[in-house]
Amino acid sequence: MKIMVAVKRVVDYAVKIRVKPDKSGVETQNVKMSMNPFCEIALEEALKIKESGLAKEVVAVSMGPSNCVDTLRTGLAMGADRAIHVEASRDLVPLTVAKLLKKLVEVENPGLLILGKQAIDDDCNQTGQMIAGLLGWPQGTFASKVVLDKEKQVATVDREVDGGLETLCLDLPAVITTDLRLNQPRYATLPNIMKAKSKPIKKITPEELNVDVKSDLEVVQVTEPPKRKAGVILSSVDELIDKLKNEAHVI
Amino acid sequence: MEKLRATSSLRRSLKSILNRQLSSISEIRYLNGKRSCQPTFSLIRDYKSLGEANAIRYRCFSSVSTVVQRNPSFSTLNSDDISYFKRLLGEKSVIQDEDRLETVNTDWMRKYKGSSKLLLQPRSTEEVAQILKYCNSRCLAVVPQGGNTGLVGGSVPVFDEVVVNLGSMNNIISFDKVSGILVCEAGCILENLISFLDNQGFIMPLDLGAKGSCQIGGNVSTNAGGLRLVRYGSLHGNVLGLEAVLANGDVLDMLGTLRKDNTGYDLKHLFIGSEGSLGIVTKVSILTPPKLSSVNIAFLACRDYSSCQKLLMEAKRKLGELLSAFEFLDIQAMDLVLNHLDGVRNPLPASMHNFYVLIETTGSDESYDREKLEAFLLSSMEGGLISDGVLAQDINQASSFWRIREGVPEALMKAGAVYKYDLSLPVEKMYDLVDDMRTRLGDLARVIGYGHLGDGNLHLNVSALQYDDKILEQIEPYVYEWTSKHRGSISAEHGLGLMKANKIYYSKSPETVKTMGSIKKLLDPNGILNPYKVLPHSLDS
Ligand SMILES: Cc1cc2nc3c(=O)[nH]c(=O)nc-3n(C[C@H](O)[C@H](O)[C@H](O)COP(=O)(O)OP(=O)(O)OC[C@H]3O[C@@H](n4cnc5c(N)ncnc54)[C@H](O)[C@@H]3O)c2cc1C
């Protein structure tokens, strides 16, 4: 079986986000970019499945501008066997990504498609569901545990839902999106970084896949959340009561 | 809603490993806050009164018991003093509350404990000047205190000295974006300066594990080295000017912001590294480098010490302009971190290695820098200098590598009693001392070696379940003699404080020490500033 994993290049989780002065989006110039944490988890899961002998190959896919290749190199250094880069200069919305993925799935025929449940930049949480819909495959989203049964060709997925866990049984091929607690992604070791250098990254364009990347969605404005006002330290309970009464008007 | 939940759960889960700064601050706060339930608390030196109420015997600090006597020429506080300070500073800045005094009387390691009855928190240079002028006239001894993270017992009183804490003087005065020169008050916490500068696109030229608590005034007064010295040099180079208050209340305005200024004796250097014994630093002007966008960190394993050393030589040659940190720890240090700190995992889990090295590069071109570092690492691996390694792929991973190195002091604290030695030694000899100590101590205690390899700075630590004279006898004076024999320094960056005041001769000639004594006498004739520290007690008599 082959596993396909979608990985997205996003502003590093630890970077303080700055909105562009013209409010058209978030500043990405000269900002550290890294693999979306949920995608790292997706890739880790695929690698684990491969290591347990249940899959033969892991293919990492990324879509976007040319430096997505860096993110794919990270994926290859973690252990993916090869990579596909769909080169697109404009921002891609989830539906477009899902359409592109569908075309790639038709070519590659993976038995499992794993994605992060969402990307930390736009927090959309849509791509996994959309691609499952387009392919007509079963989906297990927010997976916190994945168990494959090769003979029966099913995947058992624990999902984190409000108030507990839901366990699903999916017939393969299927789509799985990953939650935080699924696993702890591995580091890229030097020997693997070295090996990654000779692994192939195939480039392909949306045109070649016959997908129109134009979207019906338009971002009107991006603004920062209002700043939280600094707190004050009060010296006595009386002062607190006074403030609650006369300033906050809550008592 | 989902989005919110997702993001906040991501944040929650990543938080522990994400932010090495955060964890190190909270650790310090934790230790400061919960002293009574810390097992290490009971390990505080048992100060033995020797009949005389005013003598303190530091049994375990050196193999020959040293007795520190309270200097009888110092006055004791009376109610007039308190009223004077209240009038001067206002009620709120004159603190006699037992709990708060307990905190300022005890050092970070819980090794040194004074019995000061008064904490003053001035808000301006003028207030500091008035305090010192008054104390000098009354002959009241004073301990200048910053974040109280010092590791040599310099920041806490020995007896009943008045503690002057600069924490309320925490304003940033100016920042010049063109030159990168920052002028601020001495009480600014290092981490706050780092985040202030981050917003301006600059960084502090120094960084250290205690950043969440230590103050720039304390850093300057100890001439702190830290993790970036290999790149940006020492504070003697980066501090462009400062303002200091002398014991008699005179304010020395040396707050220049010039890179070049050869007019007479450069007195500011006297206050850099003199540990509060010559004056109180109240303002600092410091040159800050621009923040470069591309930072890469590798965590590596080496088979033996000689490989670490060769790797350093190679790194200096091949990464030259990019190298911003070169730190090492041995397997014993790694073991301690993995066992005592939550949420830390070994990035190289396959097997334990004898040595670990952390290399950081900082540059301006992400792909060029990365390629260069990768090429260096791969060739070092082929050459056998590195036996395994990982390269951080994002900031989160980078932080988790730093957490290991920066977590060593914390892990040592949690492991029980610790004897700390901070030595400068020729790099090729450095680890021989650790091996020697292991042989000497055998099963008595664990010997740990780590530190700033790039600067030839070894942190030799001996960790045991409890303090024990038998252990100390095996360490001292052996460590000092060994260091002296190899022309090293018995204090690379932590200073002398109380711990090593009498050990200064291991690294400085009698003539040099005598001159230091004359300078002290000149600037602080009554000896009220940080008494019993830095200079040998024999000079006082
Ligand atoms: C976890 C940890 C990691 C550390 N890592 C490093 C490291 O990598 N490199 C390194 O060099 N050190 C390191 N240190 C020790 C270092 O000396 C201190 O952390 C720091 O520089 C002291 O700053 P502080 O504000 O806490 O000063 P304090 O501890 O309060 O004081 C230190 C000394 O300076 C004097 N002093 C403080 N403020 C003033 C002032 N305004 N004017 C005059 N005198 C003053 C005090 O009297 C005392 O003698 C570390 C400490 C810890 C706890």
Image (tube, rainbow, N blue to C red):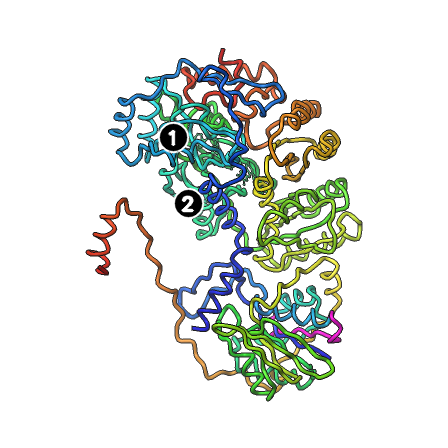
Residue B457 seen anywhere in this rendered image of the structure:
no
**Can you give x and y, in whole percent of width and height, for residue A189 in the image?**
70, 58
Does B391 appear above or below A88? above
> Disc 2 is attached to a residue of which chain?
B
Q: Which residues are magenta?
A: A51-67
CA–CA distance in space, label 1 to label 2 = 30 Å
Amino acid at circle 1 = Val
Q: Nearer the viewer, residue B89 or A152?
A: A152
**Label 1's element?**
strand
Q: Which residue is mark 2?
A: B176
Residue at coordinates 63% horizontally, 31% vertically from top-left?
A: B423
Q: Name the spot of residue B78 as percent of width and height, x first.
A: 30, 21
Image label count: 2
* Residue reaching furthest to the top: B541
Q: Which residue is mark 1?
A: B164
Measured as percent of width and height from the top left, residue B504 is found at 58, 21
Q: Residues within 10 Å of mark 2 (few under 14, many from 20)?
A: few
Q: Nearer the viewer, residue B414 or B370?
A: B414
Quarter of the picture containing the N terminus of chain A is bottom right
Dot placed on the residue nearer the N-terminal end, 1 or 2: 1
- The answer to whether B499 appears left or right of A196 in the picture is left
**Could you say which is closer to the camera, residue B253 or residue B15?**
B15
Residue at the right extreme of this rendering: B383
Does the stretch in magenta take in B222?
Answer: no
Q: Is residue A64 magenta?
A: yes
Of the 4 image quadrants, the one containing the C terminus of chain A is: bottom left
Q: Is residue A147 above or below residue B471?
A: below
